[in-house]
Amino acid sequence: MSWTRPLELRAQLHKLWERGDILSACVTGEPLFPKRLTLKTPTSAEMTERFAEVRAWISVLRALPRYRVEMREFRHRLFGANAVPHEVWIDRAADAVALIGKQQDYARFIGLIDETREQQPRLLAWLAKRPLRAVELCDEWSRLLDIVSWCEKHPRPDVYLRQVDIPGIHSKFIEAWRGVLSELLDIVLPPESIDPTATGVSRFARRYGFRDKPVRIRFRMLDPSYVLLPCCDEQDITLDAESFARLEPNVLRVFITENEINFLAFPRMKDSTVIFGAGYGFEMLYEAEWLSRCHIHYWGDIDTHGFAILDQLRSRFGNVESFLMDRRTLLAFEAHWGAEEKQTLRDLPRLNQEEKSLYDDLRDNRMRKNLRLEQEKIGFGWVESALDRLCADGGM
């Protein structure tokens, strides 16, 4: 039977709810109700040929609570005049939410509207845009509003989140809800209180003028003649990014490795330093202009993400060579091959031809599915031989 059934009428109301239309109308005042629902009715032929079924269908619809069923007259050649459903309406939002079992969420949202109108009326637009998300945040909403109000009174406060003193709210709460708070603060705060260049949850502090814990860079001087600290021979140093950028070590070569043991075991080398890498997080190095005067050698895992990180590093520094990320190394240590959990498949325009060929073989699984060789599984003698060749070639 193709005629509209009660289940299909409720499905139309569910769709209104899932789109947020019912709740948004509570904010905007848009006249969503009375709402006419789609009704598929029997054809004239069906009403003649299946009269008993039609009568049963009519009885079911007319017995539905909270719906307003508009009828029209239908004359049957044998049974005379009959009233047939013509339109089905829902007159009130309260009826709609009752029919789909959303009364509690509806009532909570009305409470959010009242609270927001009193404390932060500019955020009513956010409620209208994201009503279902607001319902999810109902238990946290009062605290979120308190944080927004605090930031409005203390624009670009230049304090750590730990120093924000709001009764009932701790810094971990702010950190946990940075994504939502960014949406709210962008609406409430004036443009001069927002750094538009700082995007994403990780840059929340910078965007709104909070202090952030300094990014630290760990490195080792590989040449004993380049002593930054006079107290010891082993120059394993950690500096904040700003201090690192101010260095002038006058080295010719910089190695970046993603593995801590490789970083610690990296052999001594003339005119060189090694940096303990941070995956895709190379922004910490971008202010160090002296790196652009060095030959940079990136040593990552031989997998798709290793090459993606190499490609990203080259987007900032043009003088980057890969180190031990070649087909010869991969094949030499086949016994130690492993599997990459989730590959990256995008094109990497900054790879050279040899690197691109190997990357394509990896992402297309031509050698083995999700193949990877982790850098720490490469024999140390192989590493030393590669460094000897590098020195013999003059560093490139």
Image: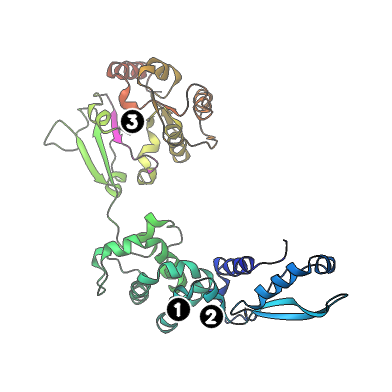
Q: Is residue 278 magenta?
A: yes
Q: Quadrant of the C terminus?
A: top left
Which of disc 1 and disc 3 is earlier in sequence? 1
Q: Which amino acid, mark 1?
A: Ala
* Whole-percent x, y for residue 102 in the image: 49, 72
Q: Is residue 387 one of those drawn in magenta?
A: no
Horizontal and vertical percent for residue 319? 44, 32
Q: Can you identify the residue that label 1 sits on?
A: 107
Q: Residue at label 3?
A: 255
Q: Mark 2 sits on what residue?
A: 94
Q: Is residue 214 above or below residue 322?
A: below
Given residues 339 and 227, the one toward you in this image is 339
- Tell me the chief SS of the magenta region: loop
Depth order, front residue of 335/13: 13
| Other residues around mark 3 within 10 Å, as few (<14) / some (14–19) / many (≥20) | many
Q: Determine which quarter of the picture holds residue 47.
A: bottom right
Question: Tag on residue 298?
Answer: none
